[in-house]
Image (cartoon, grey):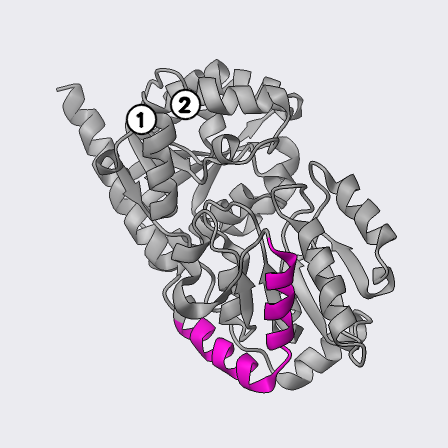
């Protein structure tokens, strides 16, 4: 049985895209009873996030002092080497390219989710942009295996990292089909009462990040929609924790003539996600760049019509299951929002979305990744013969 050391130290207390990726894969490995042993390398305070998988995993504690980005990178470049030897790992899986290890003592597989540091100006602070664009790019060229989450990201990696697509393995992310599915009407009604949201609403689920997630243009589009439909009382809900530039979004909400109809939910607990999706008139996802984009797929699976940007990987992921818009045109977004208030349009996009969402399953992602682990471990053994 292959022993895979999986770094989880960038899970950000369970509130990051990498965390969703880790949780989905662990669910997938368990569901298919993958012939691997996962060694979870995790920060002390994050242990509780992984409790439900500990019957089939080992846990190695990383001291909390290494949570910060700089200390975390240093831990990966120094102390991790000894951990890999002590745990007799066959493969190291780094799920974020900013933590790639220089000359790992065991074969190293790296997941690259996106090339946002190259594609989106001001995506991160200066130090993070430099590390992503210069240091991590060079480290990635020394990895034994690269997996990307979409064909779009694979093309970006070839362009920005100089790693040919033929040397990458594309493995789509999945969703938990047992959780994300059409919900009972009575449960939706009870849920909306519980969360005090009786008015119809459009939902955008993404961390509050400006400018990359494009909340400000969506607010402008919602104002145009509201002005064109004075008889309606639709709300716009933002679900997600504050991130870089969140103050710009909050300031724009406060200045909006529709501020009483725009609600920021903060981080949305996983338990309630399917009901938030199912209760929405539509999910609006106008992001300027995504390496994959799980929320639109989850929403489609829950019978929620989706309006989406085609940027980054989104056109590839949503396919013909979502109404595509120009994310830099508030007028175009407003038009799509207005269309999705019509029952016939809602029915059309619900059906298209359900069919598209059926293609994404963490069990299939886990099967493909297990095979990649096996190939990576075998190549490492052969290299030492």
Residue ID at (65%, 24%): 68
Residue under numbered circle 1: 162
Quadrant housing the C terminus: top left
Q: Which residue is mark 2?
A: 137
Q: Which comes before the other along the chain, label 2 or label 1?
A: 2
Q: Is residue 304 visible?
A: yes
Q: Report if residue 54 is visible in the image.
A: no
Label 2: few (<14), some or many (≥20) within 10 Å? many
Q: Please report the residue visible at 79 percent of the width from the left and 61 percent of the height from the top.
A: 262
Residue sitting at the far top: 78
Q: Main secondary structure of the magenta part?
A: helix
Where is 106 relative to 31, above or below?
above
Looking at the rendering, in which quadrant would you find the N terminus?
Answer: top left
Q: Horizontal placement of 56 versus 380: left or right?
A: right
- Magenta stretch: includes residue 370: no
Front-lying residue, 46 or 242: 242
The reply to whether the C-beta atoms of the residues labelled 2 and 1 are less than 8 Å apart is: yes
- Percent across and percent down for residue 231 are 80, 81
| Residue density around tag 1, few if under 14, some if 14–19, many if 20 or more, within 10 Å | some
**Magenta extent:** 329-355
Residue 373 in the image: x percent, y percent? 28, 39
Q: Is residue 202 above or below residue 55?
A: below
């Amino acid at each position: 049985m292959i022993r895979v050391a999986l770094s989880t130290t960038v899970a950000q207390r369970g509130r990051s895209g990498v965390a969703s990726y880790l949780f989905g894969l662990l669910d997938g490995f368990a569901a298919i009873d993958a012939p691997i042993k996962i060694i979870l390398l995790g920060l002390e305070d994050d242990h509780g996030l992984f409790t439900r998988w500990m019957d089939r995993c080992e846990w190695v504690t990383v001291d909390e002092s290494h949570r910060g980005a700089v200390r975390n990178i240093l831990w990966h470049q120094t102390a991790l080497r000894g951990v890999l030897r002590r745990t007799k790992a066959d493969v190291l899986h780094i799920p974020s390219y900013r933590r790639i290890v220089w000359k790992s003592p065991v074969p190293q597989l790296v997941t690259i989710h996106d090339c946002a540091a190259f594609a989106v100006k001001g995506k991160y602070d200066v130090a993070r942009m430099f590390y992503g664009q210069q240091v991590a790019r060079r480290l990635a060229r020394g990895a034994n295996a690269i997996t990307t989450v979409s064909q779009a990201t694979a093309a970006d990696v070839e362009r920005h990292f100089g790693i040919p697509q033929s040397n990458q393995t594309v493995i789509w992310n999945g969703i938990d089909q047992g959780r994300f599915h059409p919900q009972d009407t009575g449960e939706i009604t009870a849920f909306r009462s519980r969360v005090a949201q009786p008015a119809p609403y459009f939902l955008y689920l993404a961390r509050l990040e400006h400018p990359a997630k494009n909340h400000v243009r969506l607010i402008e589009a919602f104002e145009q929609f509201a002005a064109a439909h004075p008889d309606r009382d639709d709300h716009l809900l933002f679900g997600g924790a504050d991130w870089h530039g969140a103050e710009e979004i909050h300031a724009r909400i406060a200045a909006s003539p529709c501020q009483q109809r725009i609600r920021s939910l903060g981080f949305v607990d996983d338990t309630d996600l399917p009901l938030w999706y199912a209760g929405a008139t539509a999910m609006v996802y106008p992001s300027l760049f995504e390496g994959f984009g799980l929320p639109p797929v989850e929403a489609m699976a829950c019978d929620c019509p989706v309006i989406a940007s085609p940027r980054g990987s989104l056109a590839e992921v949503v396919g013909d299951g979502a109404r595509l818009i120009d994310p830099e045109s508030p007028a175009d977004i407003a038009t799509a929002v207005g269309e999705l208030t019509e029952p016939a349009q809602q029915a059309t996009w619900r059906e298209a979305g359900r069919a598209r969402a059926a293609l994404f399953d963490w069990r299939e992602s886990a099967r493909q990744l297990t095979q990649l682990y096996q190939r990576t471990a075998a190549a490492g053994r052969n290299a030492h013969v």
